[in-house]
Amino acid sequence: MTGGQGARRGFDLAALLAERGGERYELHARHLNHQLPRMLHTIGFDKVYERAEGAHFWDAEGNDYLDMLAGFGVMGLGRHHPVVRQALHDVLDAQLADLTRFDCQPLPGLLAEKLLSYSPHLDRVFFGNSGTEAVETALKFARYATGRPRILYCDHAFHGLTTGSLSVNGEGGFRDGFAPLLPDTKIALGDLAALERELARGDVAAFVVEPVQGKGVHAAPPGFLRAAQELLHRHRALLIADEVQTGLGRTGDFYAYQHEPGVEPDLVCVAKALSGGYVPVGATLGKDWIFQKVYSSMDRVLVHSASFGSNAQAMAAGLAVLSVMEDEQLVANARATGDLLRGRLAALVDRYELLHEVRGRGLMIGIEFGKPSSLGLRSRWAMLQAARKGLFAQMVVVPLLRRHRILTQVSGDHLEVIKLIPPLVVDEADVERFVGAFEEVMDEAHGGGALMWDFGRTLVKQAVGNR
């Protein structure tokens, strides 16, 4: 490196951020997905967060924001948990001979052993780098192990956006323009007759299902997973549980399928929260006979692998996450705090005619809005619906952030549903803060608050302009 006296040498992350951090939105617009900053500017989400800890962010002025989104579920422990941070410092300082590809490091085996202890009917683990990769692994393993080509999936399902997982994505908006996809078949969540009809054709390898769908927050009907499992096994097909978002305590059990006794999936996909919010990781857990078929000889030892799978940083983060979950009893907290939050919100349904239902499990909650009964509200509702379904939910999300400093999300395109998936560390004070803010926003919506409905008209213009 050349330069005059005093020239900066080497890489200085703090200096780089101090020098160019203010360009963040411009850099995204110029070099990344240009629609993201455009969308954030439009709805007023173009915030500049300076730091984060647990379930909270802070901006440059020191204002705190409550995170009810958890990075789409990645931040199960909240941000920057000290135990996970220390584990990553420790693994870096250890200078392990990682990813040599021709040895067996201890951390992957230890994390696999720990994960399997929560699913004693499963035997082996494949580690990849993301949720969609975990699903891709399950699809490949199911097809190879059964010798059959077809996968069944549910309407409105979301399993990832790579080609295989996109083929079992039940939302057309994600699939449009990416054909041809794999020839898989969609059924309605809970439709056992449709499942049996498809299985009778004899070519089904597996049925992949989210025990609680992320899109809209719809749980499988009581008894459906157990009955589906019995049908699948009768027809020599497999049950794949996609627990990428619902797993690791989110719904008040370690896995969401555990809410229904007797359900023992053949393959289980996890990711998101296992990362501790730091190092991408995905895992596919399965029965021994499936792995024995896929890796049937030494010639097939690398028939399915991932270049960064089982890396030491990800394995250390995963082990630290599971330790924290046990030490801080976060599964129990998700159940108790989720019940409190869902109960407080459900009590508001009779009070607000725009609020139709509150549903979910643990700290995965859907708040659904619907057509009001009074004439004045009906006309405003109709205005939004005519432009684009889902705009009212967006009208609620925006003031929650801009006025109350609470980050939430609409639970899918064209849905009048807000999904709450906060870090599992939220407490009663966070519940009270959210419910109080939500009541204020709903009071304004029902009282004809000019600012809120004026913003609704802005959203209508934006929706019409994007057609």
Image (spheres, rainbow, N blue to C red):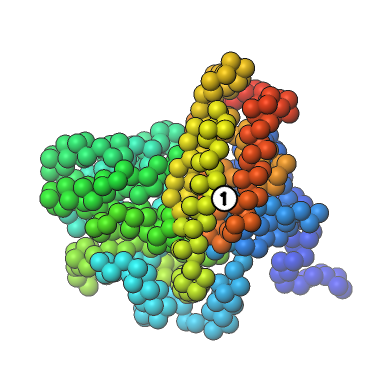
> Is 361 or 209 nearer to us in this picture?
361
Point 37% across, 80% down: residue = 103
| Vertical placement of residue 430 versus 403, above or below | below
Residue 446 sits in quarter: top right
| Quadrant into which the C terminus falls | top right
| Vertical placement of residue 349 versus 300, above or below | above
| Vertical placement of residue 449 versus 67, above or below | above
SS type, badge 1: loop
Q: Where is residue 427 in the image (x, y as percent from the top left)?
A: 59, 59
- Answer left or right for 122 relative to 111: left
Q: Where is residue 394 in the image (x, y as percent from the top left)?
A: 60, 34
Point 70% across, 47% down: residue = 405
- Answer left or right for 211 relative to 277: left
> Is 330 or 233 nearer to us in this picture?
330
Q: Mark 1 points at which residue?
A: 69
| Quadrant into which the N terminus falls | bottom right
- Answer left or right for 333 relative to 296: right
Label 1 sits on what residue type? Leu
Q: Is residue 181 visible?
A: no
- Answer left or right for 359 relative to 146: right
Q: How many circles with numbers are drawn on the protein?
A: 1
Residue 154 sits in quarter: top left
Given the current orientation, which residue lies at the most extreme bottom position? 94
Q: How crowded is mark 1: few (under 14 residues within 10 Å), some or many (20 or more)?
A: many
Q: Position of residue 229 (x, y in %)?
A: 21, 51
Point 22% across, 44% down: residue = 150
Q: Is residue 119 visible?
A: yes
Point 62% across, 23% down: residue = 460
Given the current orientation, which residue lies at the most extreme right position? 5
Q: Position of residue 357 (x, y in %)?
A: 48, 36
> Is 110 or 224 nearer to us in this picture?
224
